[in-house]
Image (cartoon, rainbow, N blue to C red):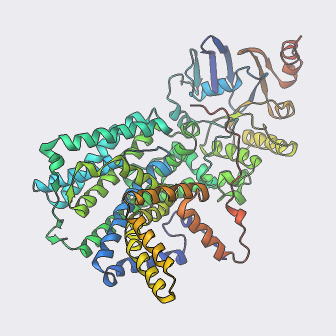
Amino acid sequence: MSLFQAENLSINFGGIKAVDGVTFDVAPGEVFTIIGPNGAGKTTIFNLVSRIYEPSGGKLTFAGRDITNVPPHLIASLGIARTFQNIELFEHASLLQNLLLARHAHKRSSFWSELLFLPSVRRMEMEHREAVEKVIDFLDLQQYRDNLIVNLPYGVRKVTELARALCTDPKLLLLDEPSSGLNVEETEDMAFWIQDIKNLLGITVLMVEHDMSLVSAVSDRVMALNYGRPIATGTPAEVQAHPEVVRAYLGG
Amino acid sequence: MRFQFKTSYNQDIRLFRDKVDGFWYALLAVAVVALPLVLDDYSVGEISWVFIYGICGVSLMVLVGYTGLVSLGHAAFLGIGAYAHAYFIMHGAPWIVAVIMAVIITTACGLIVGLPALRMTGIYLAIATLAFSVIIQEVFSRWESVTHGFAGMKVDSPNIFGWAVNDGRSFYFLCLFFMVVVLWLTRNLLRAPTGRAWIAIRDSEIAAQSMGVNLAIYKSMAFAYSAGVMGLAGALFAHKIGYLAPDIFTILLSIQFLLLVIVGGLGSLHGAIFGAIFVALLPPLIAILRDSIPDTMNQWADETGITPIGLLGNAIGEFLKKPGVEAGIFGLILVLVILLEPLGMYGRWLKIKLFFSTFPMYKASTFKRQKSYMRSERLR
């Protein structure tokens, strides 16, 4: 039984078929990575899964439920969280506020109770804060808690993106190029964290990544994409050795 | 420098940061309550304006400073609130009922105007709200059965459960009360999930959506709340000016509100109040200078025997008496603030506070922001 399934997923932008009949499934507890040259349609798949784009064909299933027509703001409460390739943090808010916002899918207070800040709201805020603090401890972000995002260096912002996604309590985590812009050391940290997310937190990871060392280190299965079509699926070693994949990257 | 040791999560949630903070706010409260006892009627009246503008500032701050939606039509909401309040009072409704109706009606108008806002941002939204305000102004002048058109509408002084608020001092406390209530309610929203959702929409709609924020609902909510608060300000505004006419609620007033939040400092409630102090007290200040500058300078001229000082004083006085000078000074200050202090008066206040609390270790670069050019392909 797979946790997430995409069947025949397609999207056209005008005449360009950005994603063209992609089928894959992600088993619970695995790290599934999508690789491919620039413009292969990897991030587009992510935007389709998080429902920001409307697919022109195909079906998305998550935990046995058809999510092809679920509005984008309900995706988080189903248990799918994502990070963004070009960091999309709330820049003029503190790191803590960024993470607390990620608890929005778990909000149960009404407008009126918030207006008066009833004790129930305060209690709920404390609960959210506890959940957030666990993630802060997990990713070692304690010292940046009260900093505004605009004042943080790029590497920390990247980790904050990951933290924010984790704060939604996801079952499926979509990581869009978690290592882009990070140095070697930070990339290694990222690899450890992804493994911990999988092993300690039991969260399934769907990842888009270019850095093959990171891909081989953490992925259980890899799918290679070119011009919106899958060309190979299998273990990292299998896919890397696949002649189609070599041709896609090197030409020939 | 004062260090804050945090031992409970509640310390990040409560209204005042710590006891020291609470003490300063208490002192401020005492000062504000004591002011009418020591000041003359004229000054008390002018400071009431600060409170009314403060409510307007909070209203616009929620929309512009926190949700990132620009409105050039907030004078229309103020007008709707003022006219609705005056209409219900004229037809015998109790004061508090009239206020509630004013708030409900403006909230409804805010919801309706907010609908196009779901699809528009930035300059387009500004133009749409501007159009709305022009339409509403036309409605004020043509719907004579309700607004009495250009003949105007007299607003009697409030009578709340038998308490006749007919002098400046009582009205001062009435405005102060409502400003504090609005500040408290808004602060509550801002420290709760709703406020965070607004901030999230301001900084990245796409991320907010992916984290579970329903953009349509929270944007309309921001518009409705902002309009409702403006409606309340409108009710007090109606009493303050005492006579409503359509040409009060023009685009110039909307721009003045926008000026208020920008000069005060976008993205903070303190900024709304600082801005209100500025906008409400600058005109009387100019009026005072208009007379006192020539007088003092002539006096110096007499004492020192240098006549040019007196002539210069007279020239400045003449200049300040010219029509449009006030608007010019407002504009000049807006330009200077945007150029020199983008964080507004509140930003400057924070800098001054930091300077003294870290003296002599203050670094000007503390508030420098790194420019980032990362946000390339923003999804819309």
What x and y, as percent, mark residue A21? 65, 12
What x and y, as percent, mark residue A203? 68, 38
Q: Decide which of B261, B297 is in the foreground and name it.
A: B297
Q: Is residue B363 left or right of residue B219?
A: right
Residue, x 12% and y 55% (percent of image)?
B90
Residue placed furthest toward the left: B92
Residue A117 in sight in this render:
no
Corner quadrant of residue A32: top right
Q: Is residue B251 left or right of residue B375?
A: left
Which corner quadrant holds the C terminus of chain B? top right
- The answer to whether A20 is drawn above or below residue A188 in the figure is above
What x and y, as percent, mark residue B344? 54, 60
- The answer to whether B289 is drawn above or below residue A25 in the figure is below
Q: Decide which of A83, A27 is in the foreground and name it.
A: A83
Residue, x 50% and y 40% (percent of image)?
B213
Residue B341 in sight in this render:
yes
- The answer to whether B183 is drawn above or below residue A193 in the figure is below
Q: Is residue A229 left or right of residue B69?
A: right
Number of numbered callouts drawn: 0
What x and y, as percent, mark residue A196? 76, 43
Corner quadrant of residue A2: top right
Residue, x 33% and y 37% (percent of image)?
B112
Residue, x 76% and y 40% (percent of image)?
A194
Which corner quadrant holds the N terminus of chain B? bottom right
